[in-house]
């Protein structure tokens, strides 16, 4: 069962916030007066099922709004959305396992990332790593 509480946190990353906003829009009709109205149905089981369907729909909306893991940056955003969804109750543990496994597969499909050379502009690598002293330099004993 998913949580029915809306996200009320400070804005996070844009992708996670989009997921939360989508979920909150679907949870808005389930405000406290509406929850009481559900409880006043003659047949409580019908009200409970309708309520659960609404909460499940909000969780599914969160899932749909998650970014697609198509690049390294998107995969990081996807993982952030999954972990935040777990924290707020929009992603259950079974879904989280599948989502995180999909992220792992996406990372492996991208292949290894070549490390970037991080040098200052205009500085040669020889300047960063001076040669070792030799016998001719006068530093040898």
Image (spheres, helix red, strand yellow):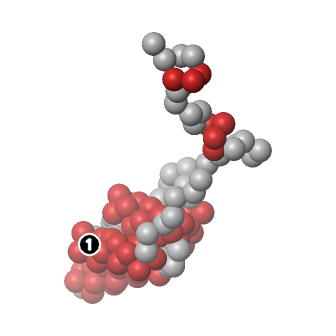
Q: Secondary structure at mark 1?
A: helix
Q: Which residue is more in the foreground, 134 or 58?
A: 134
Q: Residue at x 72, y 42 (%)?
A: 123
Q: Residue furthest right?
A: 122
> In the depicted view, which residue is nearer to us: 67 or 75?
75
Quadrant where the N terminus is found in the figure? bottom left
Left or right, residue 105 beside residue 113? left
Q: Nearer the viewer, residue 87 or 79?
A: 79
* Vertical order, 129 against 5 (above or below): above
Image position, residue 96 (x, y; %): 30, 71
Q: How many marks?
A: 1
Please provide percent x and percent y for residue 124: 69, 44
Name the residue located 47 percent from the left edge and 59 percent from the top edge.
7
Front residue of this view, candidates 124 and 8: 124
Q: Which quadrant does the C terminus fall into?
A: top left
Question: Crowding at label 1, few (<14), some or many (≥20) Cα neighbours within 10 Å?
Answer: few
Q: Residue 132: x, y in percent?
A: 52, 30
Q: Position of residue 111 (x, y in %)?
A: 43, 74
Q: Answer yes or no: is residue 56 visible.
A: yes
Residue assigned mark 1: 97
Q: Residue furthest top?
A: 141
Farthest residue, direction front: 136
Residue, x 34% and y 72% (percent of image)?
104
Q: Residue 107: name its quadrant.
A: bottom left
Asked whether residue 41 is in view, the answer is no
The residue that appears at 44% across and 69% down in the rendered structure is 112
Q: Is residue 114 above or below residue 125?
A: below
Question: Quadrant of the rendered structure where residue 87 is?
Answer: bottom left
């Amino acid at each position: 069962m998913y949580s029915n509480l809306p996200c009320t946190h400070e804005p996070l990353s844009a992708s996670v916030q989009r997921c939360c906003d989508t979920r909150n829009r679907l949870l808005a009709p389930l405000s406290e007066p509406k929850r009481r109205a559900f409880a006043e149905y003659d047949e409580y089981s019908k009200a409970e099922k309708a309520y659960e369907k609404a909460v499940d729909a909000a969780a599914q909306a969160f899932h749909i709004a998650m970014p697609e893991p198509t690049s390294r940056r998107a995969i990081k955003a996807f993982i952030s959305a999954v972990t935040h969804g777990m924290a707020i109750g929009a992603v259950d543990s079974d879904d989280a396992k599948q989502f995180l496994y999909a992220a792992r597969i996406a990372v492996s499909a991208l292949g290894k990332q070549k490390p970037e050379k991080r040098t200052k502009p205009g500085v040669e690598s020889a300047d960063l790593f001076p040669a070792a002293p030799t016998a001719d330099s006068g530093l040898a004993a």
